[in-house]
Each structure stands twice: as structure tokens, then as C-alpha cells.
Image: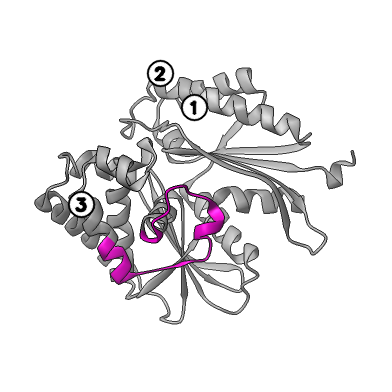
Amino acid sequence: MDILHSPCAAIEVGTNSLHLLIGEPSPEGGLSIKEDLTLMTRLGEELTPGGMLREKAIKRTIATLKRFARTCHSYRVEKLAAVGTNPLRAAVNARDFILRVERKCSFRIRIISSEEEARLTFLAIAQGYNIDDTPLLVLDIGGGSTEIIYGKDGVIEGMVCLPVGAVGLNQQYLVHDPVRDEEWERLLHNLRQRLSLLPRTASSAQAFGVGGTICTLMAVELGLKEFTPQQVELKKLTIPQLTEVIKRLKSLSIVERREKLALHPLRADIILAGAAILYAFLERYSRKEIVVSVRGVRYGLLHELLED
């Protein structure tokens, strides 16, 4: 198989989820996706800056990465890039984890900065939808960090990388089950304060949201019992819709969210914290809606692999 036409693979190791994307150039000049897989292992479970990755989280993650390696082998992938985001930036034993992955999976994870994470996310949106002259305002809600990127014509004009994500905020603020109103208000107040310091953007900028949080919120709004990327891709989530989803989530316990809304066990507990980030973002930037995208770091990474 000619390496120029062999599939390439991009792997992203995040706080809550692992992503594998396998693709090759399409005849039309875009991406032909062979596999797009997201599995939740919560590598950043109970992780604080300067803390350590927990052994059980490491084992869960490595087992899934071994599965990813087997999938890459089955597609005869010739070029693979793997990156780690917030949990590997924060953990003191990140290097040990990377070495264990290299021994068990035969690929090495590269830790990227929050700025690089934001750049790859913006690239995924700008190139993935062939957006040229429309300004973009991109929100990437992760488990351990949140990136906000603004740009036009494929060029980033500004970015903000916040050290807050759905996992960390949930652990810090939403300790009761179901969530209490005063907890929710404290969380929202904190996020409003953080975002109030950020520069505004052009009102004409199209807002895109990526990541598991916003895709899950869209799935709840649509009443989906089984999530598939195609069902939420490029759907628009409005402020009134988000408000109703938040109201419903707040009324349910974590178990009820899993049973009644079919949320993944590792998404059900953190979804409200992620919804708070999205709500505060839309409020701060005076946006009535946001376009949901399943594209993220892995898509930007794959674009770069195929261009090498």
C-alpha cells in the first residue's frame, strides 16, 4: 500500500475521553473518515494541578489505547500522531504514563500546550467546513480545560485557554445529588467572573462548539437514546433550548440522568458543569445559538498529518 494513500490516525488523550480518528484524503480534496471513535476512561479522575494520575485511571486508559492500536493495525495505518492535553499537562507522573503507553501500545504521546490544543481545534473547524470569509468564534469544552478561539480566513486572531473544565468544576462545585440551586448559582457566578475579563469579538462571528459536552447537550435536547455523531453534527443549540435542558438535568439525580436520558456513566455526573460553561459563554458573547460540531483536536491533527 502506498504510504501517500494509506490511512493516517490521530489520537487525543483528554481528561474524560480518548479519541481515535482514522482517515485519508478523499477524491474531492477533503477527508474520507474510516473510523471516528470516542471512549471515556476519565484519565483525569480526581486530578488536581501538580497531582498524580490514579493507577486505576491509568489502567483503564492504557487498555483503551491498546484497543486503539489494534484498530490502527487493522486499517494498516502508516502514520500516527497521538497527543495529550490537560491531564498530562497537570500530572506529575505524566512522563511515566507516556512511557507505559509506549511500551504497551508502541506509539508515543506528545503533550501539547493549551495554545496548541486551541490551534488544532480552530484548524478542524476552519478546514473541515471550508469556511473562508466568515469570522469564527470556537468553544472547546473539555474535562479539564476550556478553549475559546477567534479568527477569520483560517487565521487565529485571538485565543483564551481557561484552566477549567467539566470534570474539575463538577468536583469543586456540584457536590450534591441532585444538584442544589445554590451550588449551581455559585458555579455560574464563578464562570461569569472569569469570562467577564475576556475581550469581546465581532458580532458577526459564527459560534461553533466542539467536545463531548455540547454534543451530549444537543442529544438531550433532541431526545436521543443512542448517540451518533451524524445526529448532532451542525445542529444549532439555542439559549432557550439550553435553558430547558439545564432545568431538566438539575431536576434529575445522576442515576436518573443515566436511566431517563441514556447518558454515559462517565458523562452523566459532569454534564451540568459543562452546561454551565456553555451557558456562561453564550451569555458573555451575546450569542443566541451555537453550532454543534463533532470535530475537535483529532480532526486538526489529522489534517496536519495528511498535509505532511
Looking at the image, residue 192 lies above or below residue 37: below
Asked whether, in this view, residue 248 is left or right of residue 104, the answer is left
Residue position marked by numbered label 2 in the rendering: 55
Asked whether, in this view, residue 6 is left or right of residue 242, the answer is right
Looking at the image, residue 5 lies above or below residue 92: below
Q: Which kind of residue does numbered mark 2 sit on? A: Glu
Q: What label does residue 212 carry, if any?
A: none
User: Which secondary structure, mark 1?
Assistant: helix
Magenta-colored span: 221-244
Q: In front here: 151 or 256?
A: 256
Q: Which kind of residue does numbered mark 3 sit on? A: Lys
Q: Which kind of residue does numbered mark 1 sit on? A: Thr
Earlier-in-chain disc, 3 versus 1 = 1
Q: Residue 295, can we see it?
A: no
| Residue at 57% across, 23% down | 101
Q: CA distance from mark 2 to mark 1?
A: 10 Å
Mark nearer the viewer, 3 or 1 = 3
| Residue at 25% across, 52% down | 249
Q: Is residue 228 magenta?
A: yes
Q: In front here: 19 or 161?
A: 19
Residue 237 at what x, y percent from top left?
39, 67
Earlier-in-chain disc, 2 versus 1 = 2
Residue position marked by numbered label 3 in the rendering: 250
Check whether the beta carbons of the residues at disc 3 and disc 1 lie within 8 A of each other. no
Check whether the beta carbons of the residues at disc 3 and disc 2 lie within 8 A of each other. no
Residue position marked by numbered label 1 in the rendering: 61
| Residue at 69% across, 41% down | 9
